[in-house]
Amino acid sequence: MSAPDAETSALLEKALAEGLELIGKARDAPSLEDARVRSLGRKASLARARSSLGRMPEVQRRSLGAIATSVQRRLEEAYRSRKEAFDALNLEKRWQEERIDVTLPGENPPVGGLHPLTKTIWEIVDIFIGMGYRVAEGPEVELASYNFDALNTPYEHPSRSPSDTYYMDGQDENVLLRPHTSPVQIRAMETQEPPVYIVCPGRTYRRDEIDATHMNTFAQIEGLAVDEGVTMADLKGTLGKFARTLFGKDLDVRLRPSFFPFTEPSAEMDVECFVCRGNGCRVCKQEGWIELLGCGMVDPFVLEWVGYDVEKYSGFAFGLGAERAASLAHGVSDLRYFYENDIRFLQTFRGVS
């Protein structure tokens, strides 16, 4: 064997010995990968020995080439064997860390809850159902005849202006999005004879500027009682019981004169501030009272519209916004909070009845 052949052969034997030693000393996957690069990479001893074969005669090249191939296979087998061992250890470690005890109780998924406005509406409706009322509903897209004409609202009334009411067609002021649930009362009276005791919850729409106390879409709850001998005393007694049930049994209530086209006489009902008990505070704006709803005795015009005998029957009606009732009951200063879907705000009502 010539000197170059002996030198190349020694280089291959050294590459094998060093490679096996590096692979054998590897203690984890990263160090094993480093050993592979140092023993089988382009700058390893084996690669340098292979590069020298090109300058040798064909006979020596074949002989030493077979030896180089054998060295490479042995190193690759050693690397593969160690890698499989590390993979097995890693898999066992993962099994230990990630295994699941199927005997443990599972994790319950997050459970949603009722929106605070929905809870408020249900609570108010439940109070009136307890007094013998039933729930009535109607369409949100309404005819002007039910929404205005039947409720004694003349054509020149500001509420009929397109600046106040959403009309479905700008050229046709006959179909609109209802601004209150009063049309439900008209439809209910058209389909039944007195006595009528109904509460009408539903979505309503008005062209209001959105701010802390106004929304252009909101929930309203109206009520109607028509029977023989119904008086203003029945109105005050009914609404007083409702307010005390909702806000507190020891709160006082009062009625203030007001005006609505479909009631005569009309009134605004206030409740004693449940925070300061009439002494004046930020919630009641230092007045000691909080305005809750509008009400009054049903105008005879409305009863005649549906064909009731005004000499025999009388009634009262009232209406309030669910957002206002909810904000007063829970001390919410801005109605917009109810519609922003901030989960942090909504979660404060979990468990609140």
Image: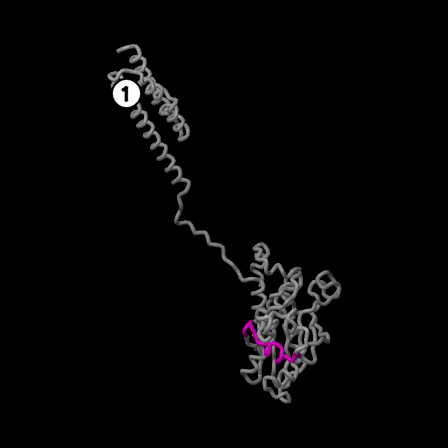
**Disc 1, SS:** helix
Residue 244 seen in the figure: no
Q: Quadrant of residue 295?
A: bottom right
Residue marked by disc 1: 65
Residue 270 among magenta residues: no
The residue that appears at 69% across and 77% down in the rendered structure is 266
The C terminus: image quadrant: bottom right
Residue farthest toward the left in the current orientation of the protein = 59
Magenta-drawn stretch contains 151: yes
Quarter holding the N terminus is top left
Q: Quadrant of residue 250?
A: bottom right
Judge the density around disc 1: few (<14), some (14-19), many (≥20) Cα neighbours within 10 Å.
some
Residue located at (37% from left, 37% from top): 91
Q: Is residue 177 left or right of residue 25?
A: right
* Residue 89 shows up from this direction: yes
Q: Position of residue 75 (x, y in %)?
A: 32, 25
> Where's residue 126, x and y in %?
56, 71
Identify which residue, 154 or 201, lies in the foreground. Answer: 154
> Is residue 25 found left or right of 304 in the rendered image?
left
Percent x, y of residue 77: 30, 28
Question: Residue 80, how many percent across, how many down?
Answer: 32, 30
Q: Is residue 246 above or below residue 3?
A: below
Image quarter of residue 68: top left
Q: Does 274 sit left or right of 60 as displayed? A: right
Between 278 and 284, the one lying in front of the other is 284
**In the image as oriented, which residue stretches furthest toward the front?**
171
Quick one: 296 or 51, which is closer to the camera?
A: 51
**In the image, residue 250 above or below residue 211:** below
Q: Which residues are magenta?
A: 137-154
Q: Amino acid at mark 1?
A: Gly
Q: Is residue 345 above or below residue 235?
A: above
